[in-house]
Amino acid sequence: MLDGKVAIVTGGATGLGRCHALELARLGARVVVNDLGVAADGSGKNESAARAVCDEIKSLGGEAVPHFGDVADWNASKGMFDTALSAFGDVNVVVCNAGFLRDSTLFNMTEQDFDAVIRVHLKGHFCALRHATVHWRERAKAGRPVYGRIISTSSESAFFAPPGQPNYSAAKAGIVALTMGAAQLMQKYGVTANVIMPRARTRMNDAGPLAAMFKRPEDGFDTFAPENVSPLVGWLASPLAHNVSGQVFVIWAKQVTLATAPHLDTRFESDARWTVDSLAATLGPHFEKLEPVKDGFTLQPM
Ligand SMILES: NC(=O)c1ccc[n+]([C@@H]2O[C@H](COP(=O)([O-])OP(=O)(O)OC[C@H]3O[C@@H](n4cnc5c(N)ncnc54)[C@H](O)[C@@H]3O)[C@@H](O)[C@H]2O)c1
């Protein structure tokens, strides 16, 4: 399905990214496996992690090259595209997946932990989307065929806004907006851009409050195997999904759930410019019927 196509997977050395890289290779894509090989909190570096996945792909008969670079570094991100172009001659599929967590409540979050998580997720997506969209637009301008797929990785945290993840949920909400803009911008070139919100057992959740939920079952279907997610990436990358763009997919277990855009709800009109008193008189009775937070903007966890 992806014979002749070139895919980049960021953070492709472990967890979900590794499964996406293997799935895209299985479908015939030549893959650039980007990974900085960091620890679960983003610290350290390890070049061997991305190489190991490339070796695994090659042992299965596929083609892959590693790219060792920080997705949120402008030049390293450009280098990732240059690696794909020099190794395989094009870039067709960009799966933005790299990232890490540094959880704590607003009370305790440091400026460094806020910046680091916003940077790796949101700026990491921005750098890749910027380089990818320019590449495809230049090809189109030169009259060359364009095949482009952007698959961004957000999280249901963007909807649930867990109080213990203010940096992460804000970054993941930003990724949705960034990708929806890319979908509109690139529609005229036939390039699609979609967002996945996965749930999977990886080192991101092998400790902490969610570890029990993600645990591998003794027997039966493995609800949170990362392999459950990658077929959606394969399908979105493929020609079969040429007409799917600007969508957000929640994906885990045997289900795929489409998220719709938040809609504008109750509207209040005034004959004149609002005043504090007229707002209180009009909105006050409305909010008396609602519960704070629970009836607010945030989606309640399922
Ligand atoms: N696991 C889940 O349940 C879950 C849920 C929602 C969203 N996600 C998202 O899925 C993506 C993959 O997460 P995972 O669970 O597989 O975690 P993971 O820690 O197994 O994989 C993340 C990979 O990204 C790499 N990475 C981190 N910073 C990097 C950087 N600056 N440059 C290049 N590579 C870097 C890491 O080395 C690692 O290999 C993340 O964006 C995560 O936020 C995961």
Image (tube, helix red, strand yellow):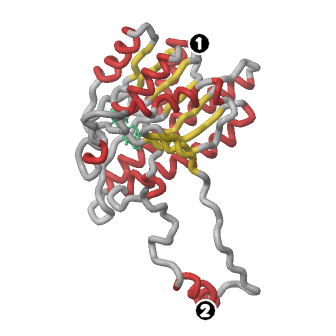
Q: Is residue 63 above or below residue 187?
A: above
Q: Which residue is drawn at 45% across and 34% down?
A: 229
Q: Residue at x 29, y 57 (%)?
A: 104
Is residue 83 visible from the viewing direction of this image?
no
Label 2 and label 1: CA atoms lie apart by 65 Å
Q: Residue 221 carries which label?
A: none
Residue under pointer 2: 277
Q: Which mark is residue 4?
A: 1
Q: Do the residues labelled 2 and 1 touch (CB within 8 Å)?
A: no
Is residue 225 found left or right of 129 in the rendered image? Answer: left
Residue 233 location, x and y as percent? 52, 30
The quadrant where residue 267 appears: bottom right
Three-letter residue code for mark 2: Asp
Q: Residue at x 68, y 23 (%)?
A: 146
Disc with the residue nearer the chain's start (2 vs 1): 1
Number of residues whose C-alpha sits closer than 10 Å to that of mark 1, classed few (under 14), some (14–19) or many (20 or more): few
Q: Is residue 189 above or below residue 289?
A: above
Q: Which residue is drawn at 35% across and 32% down?
A: 15
Q: Which of 56 and 273 is in front in this view?
A: 56
